[in-house]
Amino acid sequence: MLLAHGMRCKPLAEWPTSRHVRPLSHRGSRTIPDLRPPPPKTALNAQPSPRQLYAAGHFARTLSWSFVDLALGYYLHVRLGLSAAHTGQLLAISLAYSSVLDLLLAAVFTRLRNQQRLALRLQLIGGLGTAASACLLFSPSSATEPAFLPLLAASLLFRTCYAVYDVAQNALTSLLPRDENEAMRYVSARAVVVPISKLCIAAALFGVVGSPASAGSGSALLICMIIGILIVAAALPLACVATPAQPATAIRPVAGALPLPALLPVLLAAAAETALVGLAGRLFPFADQGAALTFAMVAGMVVAPWLHLRLRPPLCSETGLIALMSVLAIAAVCVYQAKPSLPVAIACAAVHGAAVASVGLVLWRRTALIARRHAARSGREDDLSCFALLTGTMKLSIAASSLLLGQLLPGIQAGDPVTSAALVSLVAVGSLLSLAALAWPVALPRTEGLHP
């Protein structure tokens, strides 16, 4: 009858809800709630937070940089048979190119919109390229004479991919946190994973440095493959992190001048410390017990933050800490060049690593302080550009140090006393220059609530 009059009866599940009838397609109602507990969170269904994914990505990124930085010179010279001069030239060209590329990418990145989404995508693209190019760079070669240009091309490819990866990761340090408290958690996570990754690479060098030629070459490629898997495993989930939509009318800050007068002493100190003082550490992998000495140097770098906190109050100033570390760096190199026993040489390497890393902490801290005061005064956040200047200066200094390495390595391996004296002189000059630059008084713009 209802159908004859053009009416039909709705199914019970489509009836409107009321306080007496609950829909059959929903769990619970206002009168009869669903008291069943939700499924528990376990390790199988738990989702990592963006901070955990960021820490994993930074761990993998530091693995790739540390391995190439510590092992590439040894691999090219000892494993592939490239001459010391050509090894230094290859490292210098690739690092100089990388330093310029860092500055260009940072300058372009700061002028783009929707930086968070772009950084998440770039860290995936750069990470995949870094993993592939590192495997290409450490691929064993069957040629009797290593070709300089193909090795240089592979090195430049790695530096290009890593620069994209590095700039994106550094930008996420300030783009992912929602407030200052969360930003401190990101910085703390970074401070934890960097020493752990460096120790992992220092331990892995025992399979590359000092081992037989065939085994060492295969081990280097295997380490690169493992690092590549870790990069992909961290970069893929991080690229899928949801990003808030940015309003189309968002106003970008007008580009202005960087605080170069305040940054200049820091950049000069970074150049002297990296090019001259750090030169001694780049010679450790070529020694008889190169893996043990490199591991001791990295271990000294790991304990440097703890030493910084413990030694600064008794010395009453940061300048006193820098002076102490400069003296320790010079003394460690002097004792090491006297050909001591292995335990003493390991202790010298550890002291040298702690001294260099302690001065490096001062450089990063002062750069952050200058960037914060500049942002408070001008209203522009130029942190990425300031740190790009610092990292670019360090890479350019490593390039210059690589040229010196190619000139000093034959004499150091032959035990030439003149070369040893030249090395000690370079380390002393670098220590004194960095001390003078960091002790020089600089008039920083004062703002409320910011203290060094």
Image: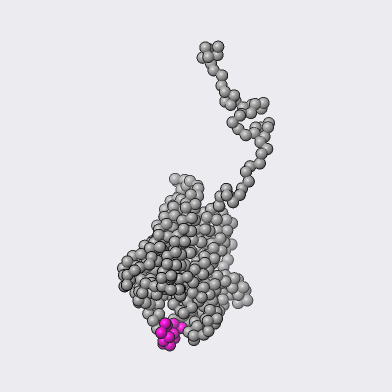
Residue at the outermost bottom position: 417
Write the residue at 55% across / 79% down. Answer: 347
* Rendered image quadrant of residue 415: bottom left
Query: In this rendering, is residue 187 above or below 84?
Result: above
Q: Quadrant of the C terminus?
A: bottom right
Residue 414 lies within the magenta run: yes
Looking at the image, residue 17 sits to the left or right of residue 111; the answer is: right
Write the residue at 47% across / 61% down. Answer: 226
Query: Foreground: 436 or 132?
Result: 132
Residue 215 lies within the magenta run: no
Write the residue at 50% across / 48% down. Answer: 242
Looking at the image, residue 305 sits to the left or right of residue 96; the answer is: right
Looking at the image, residue 40 sits to the left or right of residue 279; the answer is: right
Write the residue at 52% across / 56% down. Answer: 54
* Rendered image quadrant of residue 30: top right
Specify whether residue 439 is in view.
no
Specify whether residue 349 is in view.
yes
Q: Quadrant of the N terminus?
A: top right
* Rendered image quadrant of residue 179: bottom right
Query: In this rendering, is residue 330 above or below 97?
Result: below
Residue 228 spot, x, y in % from top left: 45, 59
Residue 437 spot, x, y in % from top left: 48, 75
Residue 67 spot, x, y in % from top left: 46, 67
Query: Foreground: 271 or 5?
Result: 5
Query: Foreground: 279 or 9?
Result: 9
Query: In this rendering, is residue 303 above or below 424?
Result: above
Q: Which residues are magenta?
A: 412-424
